[in-house]
Image (spheres, grey):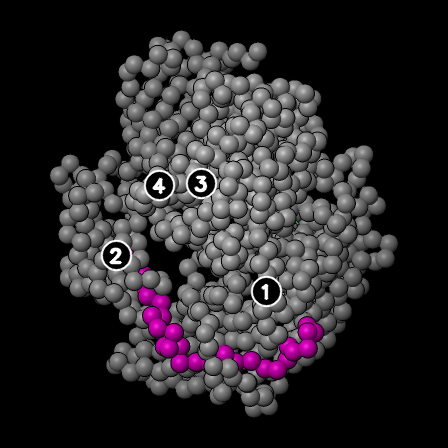
Amino acid sequence: MGCDQPRLSWKLEGCDRATAYQIRSASVAEQLRAGDADLWDSGEVASPGLIDVPYSGRPLNSCERAYWQVRSKFDGEWSGWSDISFWERALVDPGEWSAEWISLALGEGGQPAPAQLLARQFEVPAKPIARARLHYTAKGLIRAYVNDNDVSAGLLDPGWTDYRHRILYRAVDVTSVLRAGTNKLSAIVGDGWYCGNLCWFGRNRYGARAMALLRLLVEFEDGDRLMVGSDSAWRGTDVFVRTNDLIDGVTQDFRIMVPDYARWTPVETFPIGGENLVPASCPPVRSTEVIDTLGTWQNSAGEWLIDFGQNHTGVLSMELTGACELEVVHGEALDAEGNLYTANLRTAKQTDLIVSPGGQRRWSPFFTFHGYRYARIAGHSESTPPMVRSHVLHTDLERTGWFECGHEGLNRLFSNIVWSMRSNFVDIPTDCPQRDERLGWLGDAQIFAPTAAYLYDVSTFFAKWMPDVISGMSERGIFPNIAPQLEELVEGAPGWADAGVIVPWTMYEFYGDERLLSDCYPAMKRYCHAVLDANPDWIWRNLRSHDFGDWLSIGEETDKTLLATAYIGRSLRITADAARVLGLEADYISLSKAHEHVASAFKGEFPLESIGTQTGLILAAQSFDLTESEWAALGDRLEARLVANGGKLATGFLGVAGLLETLASTGRDRLAMDLLLSTEFPSWLFPVENGATTIWERWDGWTPGGGFQDPGMNSFNHYCFGSVGAFFFERLAGIKRLGPAFNPIALLPLVDERLGFVDLRFTTRYGEIRSRWEVESGHLNWEVTIPSGCRAGAKLPRFATNLSTWSVEGPASEVEGNPVTRAFRLYPGRTSIRGPLQFDVG
Ligand code: BGC
């Protein structure tokens, strides 16, 4: 934890609403168990608590631990104390590193360099160790070892930030791997984002040389301390990892033996300067799954082709037997002749080279990742296929959303969305994991953020990314297109720059995170003002940078001024709402007024009846308040646009996320479902029908008539069109967020008999919400589970008939007086709602 005041959260089980809580915290677990809260006792607080209660005890010292527990009061009675949990403070003062950056002079001159092995030995006295902490980071990538045990938190530490502004470090507990006598602390350091190839910008974007920084502190039970920092006592050597590059791949030559430690060369040292070293608070990139081969065959050149059956991001591992020189190329698709298709990788090589002098060894590359479903292996001369497996890599976030229904195509679409998320949440939200790009494009991130937040807990992931969005802001106050920012001073386009406003708000909606919101708020407000200052008539005409528009829309082009104005309208409303949440009343009033000005200028310049594209109508609906008659007109017009387009979608990156939602909000559930279930080109299920295992960048990435789209831009693993995932949660399962962190919620599923059943689970910060419905012989069986501490309401879905015959069993009570349907208040636990349906699908 890098802050004085971490926030404490807990979940209740099997009870309704608490009226009070008490937290106590101590520096020793036993002490806490005995009731001695030397750090903090909140006393009885008349509130349920549950999420983000700031710790208000004595500030901790560096690496100090706080143990804590909580109890809740129900109906005047205290629960027992919870289990004990703990957190640990990071380094408070950068001066405490007592270490220097260390490096070997291997990487200068712009050429790929071998990875460096850096190490030193040290003596540990033979007495009991209380605990040992290793802090480490790199300008580049680092794997840390104690006595040759890999103690690294992740595979691509310390991750990608704009290193000019911030470098993250990790802290790990290494107590169990130390021993009395001689010990070794070592690190392998590679190029990574710091000095390897980045996108099409080439090498050395941040520096020409990879470096490491480490600090080991051993604390003994008798109070003695031993500190081993990276310094001039370290020695280093190059290793068998001859080149290592995130985009091009890795060369490993196992003939290169590590020489005797005595013959290693001394490292060069560089003092810690103005670097902003910040503790990492987001999970690291790890291997989260291993995939076995689905098919293996040899081509006429004797090369082996491997199909893993699933497009993903990862690295291979292979069992090597005997001397060999292998080349492993990774690609997403096969061409019409069955060859590995690599044209869409552009200049990315995605190639690993291996030289082995013989003997048995297990190979897996270091400091790289590839985007692929297939691999082609040259040089494997044996008649049996190479023994390979694939290791899926991404930031190891906690899964929160699961969906299944009775329609195989939708299940596969959902799975493809999950896989594209996993493939592109590799330390930052990337556009794609395979070609020479892999950048944190803001437009993509904001469009997909709600779906992402349903699927995984992305609270720390986006909290890690947002400082790079903010530091990438131009002097005029415009957020960038990509973060970490690479193109100096390039300002973001409408819909891209707006991510600087939309993402922190999405995190607030999903997690109730007011701290991130208040950290981002000054930049959000500055951005809104920068756009308005340049556009005095409230229409966003100036300062639109690249102006990507509704990127990759198909068949319709939305007016870019309309799109931009809708976006700044939305950003203003969000920023006004953020001001209200943060208690900034004057800002709330002035930003709301500005939003109204933009709304009326928009309606003047782009009357609803003149908007001629699906995306134009969707953005108007998303960004501005509409009267009932305007809603009705917008719905009619959207339907008319769809009909005019042969019943097919025409949206690009920005329109796509709101298409089905806008249709459903104007009562066109059936039309929304027709689009979702369509397999005709262009549609979500068209790629599914054509074998997609991830979401394609373009609707027409591949077509039966045209084959592959332009290889200059044709990724098969881009999550944007997967933003439809939110619709599965919000409409198919019917979970509507009414308050931050989904408390309260309203439940109202969109029942469509073509799905048979829908079973959706979603873990909020309060616990799991489940909505499962099934249509059987004209009847609906709907089961809803609500977590403790959460308030919820439900209504009978559309098509419910004979309302009085519906039965409701479980912790629920009826809300009287609904003229159209029956409505219920639901309490924590499981409620079953059953009754007849009469589908009117005309
Ligand atoms: C990226 C996109 C990005 C776009 C900007 C592309 O090269 O892959 O995902 O949003 O550029 O228009």
Three-letter amino acid code at disc 1?
Trp
**Nearer-the-camera pick, 58 or 801:** 58
Q: In what quadrant of the picture does the N terminus appear? A: bottom left
Three-letter amino acid code at disc 4?
Tyr
Query: Residue sitting at 51 percent across and 58 percent down?
Result: 475
| Marks 3 and 1 close (CB-CB < 8 Å) | no
* Among numbered discs 3 and 1, the one appearing first in the sequence: 1
Crowding near pointer 4: few (<14 within 10 Å), some, many (20+)? Answer: many
Span shown in magenta: 84-112
- Residue 675 in percent (x, y) is at 61, 26
Mark 4, residue position: 588
Position of 228 with respect to 53 (left or right) is: right
Mark 3, residue position: 572
* Residues at marks 1 and 2, CA–CA distance in whole angstroms: 36 Å
* Among numbered discs 4 and 3, the one appearing first in the sequence: 3
Q: Is residue 91 magenta?
A: yes
* Residues at marks 4 and 3, CA–CA distance in whole angstroms: 10 Å
Q: Secondary structure at mark 2?
A: loop
